Amino acid sequence: MVEDTFVRGGGEPDGADSLRTFGAALQALREHVGLSREEFAEVVRFSKHTVASVELGRRMPDVAFVERAEEATGNTGVLSKTLKRVARQPGLAAWFRRWARLEATAITLYTYECRLVPGLLQTEAYARTLFTNQLPPLDDEQIEAQWTARADRQRLLRERPNTAFGFILEEGVFLRRTGGTEVTRELLDHVLEIAELRNVELQIMPQVQETHAGLDGPVQLLETPENQWYAYCEGQRGGLLVSDAKEISVLQRRYARMRSQALTIRDSVSLLQRMRGEL
């Protein structure tokens, strides 16, 4: 089980071979207990193709896979410890990796953001504006790695049509015009396009709002295929991954209240269209 964890630090993950290392450890343990890939796949309730992809270092194992694999191989703890060193790819900040593993298989993902347009909705120009203005400065290779990782994450919106995505964004993140007018115009076009997807709900929290349940800052909530909920809160130099049911209940209630305080989906789209027309 993922424990409540606060991870500090910026920078990029290291160890490009970490996925292959995890896969090799899994294969060795599977063979040690005398299971074929087909037999192992049945035990962990994943397809044999998924097992093969993980063992070959081609696929990031999710939390459920690792927990079941641990049970199937004798609860040695080797896989759980190895997973902590696995990096999906360069470009994901160290504190974000565990959340990204959960995000990749989530069936529900809710996001409230008051600082900027969240990564899943960013255009390349908008994202690169953020990357080039980071402090300490990033070099060209780091910027490319960050954009590649972000673009890969964005595929979730279209490749997981059965996942429900909800976004509540402050009107101010668009009024700021990060990157300039052209970048903002393209960003609004992109967000409006994403808002048309059947599995996406987008709401705008108006700039003038007398009551607001989200004043403590941004939050993300997700539901796993096993119907377990997690939350993630990010700050300047780190992130908090929350699994405690009581804490998550509080954050869910706040998110639910914000949904009632924000503009409706239709009015949110109308506002973004009006903002686009005024640029």
Image (cartoon, rainbow, N blue to C red):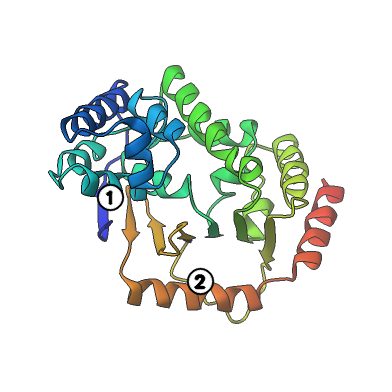
Residue ranking furthest to the top: 141
Asked whether, in this view, residue 128 is left or right of residue 46, the answer is: right
Secondary element under disc 2, as helix, strand or loop, is loop
Label 1: element kind: helix
Q: What residue did someone put label 1 on?
A: 67
Q: CA distance from mark 2 to mark 1?
A: 33 Å
Q: Please name whichever residue, 143 or 107, is drawn nearer the observer in this view of the structure.
A: 107
Q: Name the residue type under label 2.
A: Gly
Quarter holding residue 4: bottom left
The one of 229 and 61 positioned closer to us in this rendering: 61
Q: Is residue 256 left or right of residue 57?
A: right
- Residue 159 place in picture, x, y as percent: 62, 40
Query: What residue type is disc 1 on?
Result: Glu
Q: Residue at x 37, y 39 (%)?
A: 41
Residue at (72%, 47%) from the top-left corner?
194
Q: In terms of depth relative to the viewer, which is nearer, 101 or 260?
A: 101
The answer to whether residue 96 is visible is no
Q: Which residue: 46% across, 31% down? A: 49
Neighbour tally class for label 2: few under 14, some 14-19, many 20 plus, Cα within 10 Å: some
Q: Position of residue 236 (x, y in %)?
A: 37, 50
First in sequence: mark 2 or mark 1?
1
Q: Which residue is mark 2?
A: 214
Q: Position of residue 1 (x, y in %)?
A: 27, 58
Q: Is residue 20 visible?
A: yes
